[in-house]
Image (cartoon, rainbow, N blue to C red):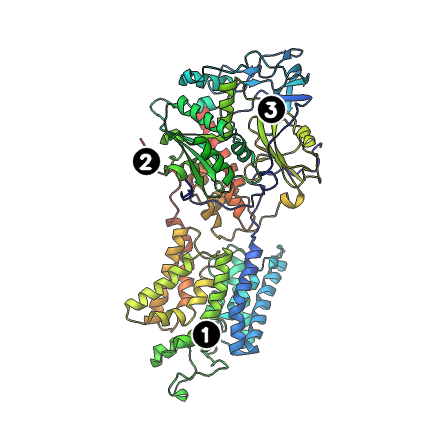
Amino acid sequence: MATMVAKTFRGGVHAHYHKEDTASKPIRRLPPPARVVIPLHQHTGAPCEPLVKVGDEVKVGQKIGDSSARLTAPVHASVSGKVVGISLHPQSGGRDVLSVIIESDGKETLDEHVEPRTDVDHLSADEIKAVIREAGIVGLGGAAFPTYFKLTPPPGKSFDTVILNGAECEPYLSADHRLMVERPGDIVDGARLLLKATGVNRAYIGIEENKPDAIEAISKAVKGDDRISVVPLKVKYPQGAEKQLIWAILGREVPSGGLPVDVGVVVNNVGTAAAVRDAVFSGMPLVERVVTVAGSCIAEPQNVVVKVGMLVSDLIEACGGYSAPPAKVIIGGPMMGVAQFTTDIPVTKGTSGVLLLSKDEAAPCDAMPCVRCGKCVEACSMRLMPLWIASYAEAGRFDDAERMNALDCIECGCCSFICPSRRRLVQAIRLAKSEIMARRRRAQAK
Amino acid sequence: MDGTGLIVSSSPHQRAAVSTPVIMSDVILALMPAALAGVWFFGLRALAMMVVCVAAAVGTEAGLEKLMKKPVTIEDYSAAVAGFLLALVLPPDLPLWMGAIGAAFAMAIAKFIFGGLGQNIFNPALIGRAVLLASWPVFMTRWRWPIFQAPWIPDFDAVSSATPLALWKLNGIKTPYLNLFLGNVAGSIGETSALAILVGAAYLLWRGHISWRIPVSFIGTVAVLTALFGQDPVFHVLAGGLLLGAFFMATDYVTSPVTPKGQIVFGVGCGVLTVFIRLYGGYPEGVCYAILIMNAAAALIDRLTVPRKFGEVKKVA
């Protein structure tokens, strides 16, 4: 393994990673907050209906929201206590979402359904998938796509490979890194469960080379299981993007408009694998996750295990508060994360990081004219022509933007990052994408 | 935190450190060795030409922008770069006022009326040079020996001072490699010393501001083609404006293709045209026109060399 040449994809950028503040510190478990706000819609798919009423007593791991829709993920109480409200609350996506507000009794009483399983080896693929669904597990890398749904190939398609994503290419974030160092066995157990759930016997765990301790820990944990290999990846953003990761590891190109399943692959984050392991072995649904709290304006940057529903403002308090007034609060990483207008938002299943950036780090810059340097073309991880698509979008020529493959853009942000004229390229392409999709919907409605 | 004062913008929230003004000032820095060589070989007159051209270029851009009530953009340094580049491709004894007219023309006609930075089709410095050559051909082809004499010419008095390419084309005299490499030959202010140009080019490559594609394909094409035509490829690479043109003019972002493949096509095109002008044209040197002609084709080359997008494959069964 040590002699293996690190793999990668074409394009991408090298950013300042800023991981040193958090990557070497152990994950700290935060005490349960006095109050949690648990959104009923934290995932891709249909929102949940509340299963509790105001005044109900709830326990840790109790299901408090579910939906009969095919694509959804139930939500669970992350603390024990009393439901004090079910109302709209702002969420990191920018919208107000119906949320269950629970006041903790501090006892952390477990729901009776949360029981360690003794028959793990006898679970069938469908049983594992059912456990994953009931545990409300979604992709923890940030996209929050329901995991059970991904594990079932659509009719006519099949998997031959499982990939675990431990690239963690976003700057600042080190939650996956710490998890790989501290819980490698659980991640590998999760990988084995994913293999069983998909009926596959080949798994790769891709990790960027800047995490040698994680590569070592995971390599040790997979020893003896020749179905699973660790693949060192070059340090380059967006190495952890699904299509780029599959290309780097397998040399397979997910077709335009397609999904990893089109090339026989299912990709899951390493954190998701650990959550799968927890759900199957201990019966604990997804009620907490590791979050990187970083940036120059937080007093004690670190990785913490946080209850889903803890308010970001409380989380910042728990990490020592502000060391300087932040100019920007970001949920996620600096390349694809979402800037917030308030910290009165809950940590959700998809919250990988909370970044507090100073004015110097986050200062918006004025765009200059495009000088046609071509750096965006070289950096584009999907090999598009960002300068053209963005120009068309800015001119309102969305048909031309579509012709230039705007919809293939994965919004990694490399073009805007690298642009020496500070143009808002991916931002304009995003606009084009949503306009193209809106036009399609309108055309269909007619 | 109630959120007042938090900046909300669309990702990415991080930007690379290199900005357009940084690149432009790095280009100026990278031209310094060639400029210093010019002053060393041709005296303070060369320095005066640089000052005049830069001042005329910057002044013209600022003046026109003020006149048209547009934001003044001289702080992006692109006007200074154009003026500097023009001075380096002019003969050392050209009257200074001609240099000023060339620089003003470059900024006003070649850049400003096209829409300013990023919009011009042709390299402004080369347009300035072409206009001066068309307007004052005698002054533009009157060369001077550098301060150090030219001992390799057998009968010195027999030939008027001429550039190595002209000496070769008209008199059959080949300038030794070492002189071409160091730069003590007749020629434009900044193009005589291959060494000085390569030092600056290495800096730009190291900083990542230019890629190898255009210079390597341009110079490589000239070497291969001249060899095929039975000429001395090393001489053709070192002599004339090829190195300065390939590293500093053809790589101009605005007037060259943006696609990686297109940049190679562009470089090869520049090389082919340069060789044909040198060997079969009326002028001894063809770099300037070769680049200008390829400038006109840059947008077309881009359209024909759009990369194959990721995922544009047959579905894997």
Q: Which of the labelled discs sits on residue A308, or is there none? A: 3
- Are discs 3 and 2 less than 8 Å apart at CB? no
Quadrant in the rendering for residue A109: top right
Q: Are marks 2 and 1 on the same chain?
A: yes
Three-letter amino acid code at the position of disc 1: Leu
Three-letter amino acid code at the position of disc 2: Lys
**Where in the figure is residue B270, as x and y percent of width and height?**
38, 62
Which of discs 3 and 2 lies nearer the camera? The answer is 3
Quadrant in the rendering for residue A353: top right
Nearest the viewer among A193 and A103 is A193
Quadrant for the C terminus of chain B, please: top left
- Would you name the residue on which mark 2 appears? B314
Q: CA distance from mark 3 to mark 1?
A: 69 Å
Nearest the viewer among B152 and A45 is B152
Residue neighbourhood size for the residue with mark 1, other residues' Cα within 10 Å, grouped as few (<14), some (14–19), many (≥20): some
Nearest the viewer among A115 and A81 is A115
- Would you name the residue on which mark 1 appears? B182
SS class, disc 3 = loop
Quadrant for the N terminus of chain B, please: top right
**Where in the figure is residue B142, as x and y percent of width and height?**
46, 79
